[in-house]
Image (cartoon, coloured by chain):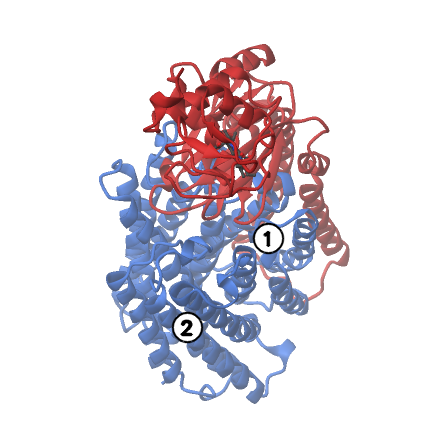
Chain colours: A red, B blue
Amino acid sequence: MLNFLALESISSWFPPEASYQAFWMDKAFLGILMAAVFAFVLVVGLAITFVIGNRGKVAIEGQGVNQLARGLWVLGAILLYYFAFSSNFCGFMDTTQAPYGAYEIDVTASQWDWEFTYPGGHVTDTLHVAIDRPIRLNMQTEDVVHSLLIPALRVNQAIIPGKISRTWFQADMIDTFMLRSSKYSGEKYADMHTAMITHSPAVFTEWLEAAGDIFAGRTLSEVGEILYTRHGCAACHSFDGSKRVGPSFLDMYGNTFDTKEGVAVTVDDAYIKESILKPNVSVIDGFDPVMTPYEGILDDREIEALTEWFKSMSSFADQGEK
Amino acid sequence: MNNNIAFKYLGLTAAMFLLGGLLAAFMKMGAGSGDSTSHAVLNQMLTYHGVVMSFLFLIPVIPTFFGFTMLPKQLKIEKMCCNGKPGFTLYSVGSLLVIVSAMKFAVSTGWTFTPPYSLIDGGALATMSVGLVLVALSWAMTGMNFIKTVHKSEVGFFDMPMLSVSLYLNSYLMLIGGLIFSVVIVLLSLANAFGIGPFAGQFSTTLMQNSFWFAVTPLLFFALIPAVGIISDVIAGLTNRTLVSKKSVTWSLAALAVLSFASWGTHIDQGKTLGFVFSAMGLLTAVPIALITYSWIATLSRGEVSCQPATRFTVAFLVSCGIGILSTLFTNNMSIGSYLSSTMFTTAQIHYLMVGGVVTSVLAGLHFWWTDITGKEIRVSLGKLSGFLYLVGLNISFFPQIIMGTKGLPQGLHTIPVGFETLNWVSSLGFIVLSLGLLLIVYNFITSTDTMSSGHSD
């Protein structure tokens, strides 16, 4: 009974258990705690008993050691340490290797922000996950050491510069939980917290579809700019006029260029669509046919958005429109 | 005449303790009152609290005072091998530089200087580093001095009282750890100022953390070795007996000293395999710790224990250092340990070990040997009262932090998140009680009287 009461009140030492791993870790914690309390009461209790109880007693002479008692004492200590060491060891090993097919989310930590990127390329500053399915986080830092702490999952993983730090979990409770950095990183370190929001799998899919729809609430040209970064066009194209591997998007729309075959082409909607889907059919003079075809990656609506964005930064825009 | 230098050291280490304590108090006030104090200032306080307490107080406090006063007494020699003055000068100049650095270019990297964060403000570490290197050299000199003194004396290793044994072993840690520490600090400030050296590179984080803890673990966590030495001798003194199976305690201390060099990895986020090895290393410490406690309990069991202030502090040591040691059971467990790392749990742990262990042992030793060393008498009842306040304050102050940690509150936040206000408030209350206890203790020592005739047992 007493035991039961103590367990009840000690479980209030913990945040909610939002995963199977958290549940086992708390069990291990309580087990070690009980063993530790026992050891503590034994040592301190004996010491106090002797200090108070031996008043006026005549000292026992001699230095003899009770070998048996000492042996048991040492054995007890070894067992205590071994028990504490091995508790939940399987649970720990589990956490090191995500199950096959886990849902992957990329995490970028920087002073003093979190950024979560979902498989479709959607980016958020709070972590959304579906319950009852393994989630793997691939974490990177842009600057100093950070650590991802989600108390409700008992997850606390350091993110070391220059490598990808991984962790995984499977939440089983729908709620909003604290997520923060637990590694001191300077001035606004205390503000480096956000939320982890768990959904049922169906709600998560809906959420991602709605949130992942970049057209919602944006003009076409804004969407075009997002696609430009998201699909890596920036590696080869600038939009300030400077030449990279490919021509700059500034003043491109409506302008006229020569192809390698010496044909003059005017950049209009149709030409842009062709250049993106089958870029190496007609190659602009002075460039190599190295652009990846985006057929099957960008759909008509997205190409339309890119086209709008190109128009918005071209002084020849009206010449392309027919 | 050794006492002279010992008291200078005691004064300086006590001043550092006071400084570190005041910083802690300001931090608590700043954190309690929302974000009125700027984050940056609180970060600096946090850094200086750590640096001052660890390097300017905890590491030198026992060896310097008890070394210079008790070592000659216990080894029955006239004086130490060297007079310790150069070491003291280095220590004072070094400490001064650390303090000056706070005014000139306050460092806010945290006291473990983890790169790349610690490399950001180019040159910021320079002044403090010079100070810390001087301090580290003074540890090394003190270590050398003790080693030579012990070698010169006639007393054999197993015949020395435990304090001398522990100081002798600790001297090697101070010597080797101090030299490695200086190198680490120099390399770190080179990386910080000029971006050169091994810590400036891509893999600097892991390398630096490994080297730092390799030097600091033995120095800091095994500042507990002389603490165990003091408590062993105090228990022997209080019971007026030799320790039961003293030889096993001697061996245990030696084993702990060796293990301390091997256990640096427990403070870093290691890979799976290394983590396992370091975690298992904790297992090995179980045997020496068990042997030591067995000897203490057995010694106490054999008859009357004299009841004085030092008895209270000995019990206080068993309670609070016991909680500290037992808390390592949780942090050594791989799954729980990774969750609790860099949370308030580890803050509580280091304070239970360093305040509860090291500071309490210093107080036990001071109360027990004060009359021996100074010829003055303290008030017994005040000593007992302050011992009680100290123990109660210490636990009210640090136990809530254990719970804050398991609830998932990280270290070093300067705003108290919702849900932690009560625990934080209780902890602050404990801090006040603890400070009050310490003030009474200091008052008791300062006003201790020359003769046996007046001012006590009132």
Frontmost residue, B234 versus A142: A142
The residue pinned by badge 2 equals B133
Q: Is residue B22 above or below residue A281?
A: below
Residue A30 position in % (x across, y down): 61, 32
Q: Please tell me which residue is depicted at 35% across the width and 29% down the height of the picture.
A: A314
User: Quarter of the image containing the N terminus of chain B?
Assistant: bottom left
Amino acid at circle 1: Thr
Q: Quarter-wise, where is residue A5 in the image?
A: top right
Q: Earlier in the sequence, mark 1 or mark 2?
A: 2
Frontmost residue, A55 versus A214: A214
Q: Is residue B194 above or below residue B22?
A: below
Chain where mark 2 sits: B
Residue B144: which numbered mark, if any? Answer: none
Residue A80 position in % (x across, y down): 68, 45
Q: Classify residue B156 as left or right of residue B369.
A: right
Chain where mark 1 sits: B
The residue pinned by badge 1 equals B266
Q: Please tell me which residue is depicted at 46% across the width and 20% down the height of the picture.
A: A269
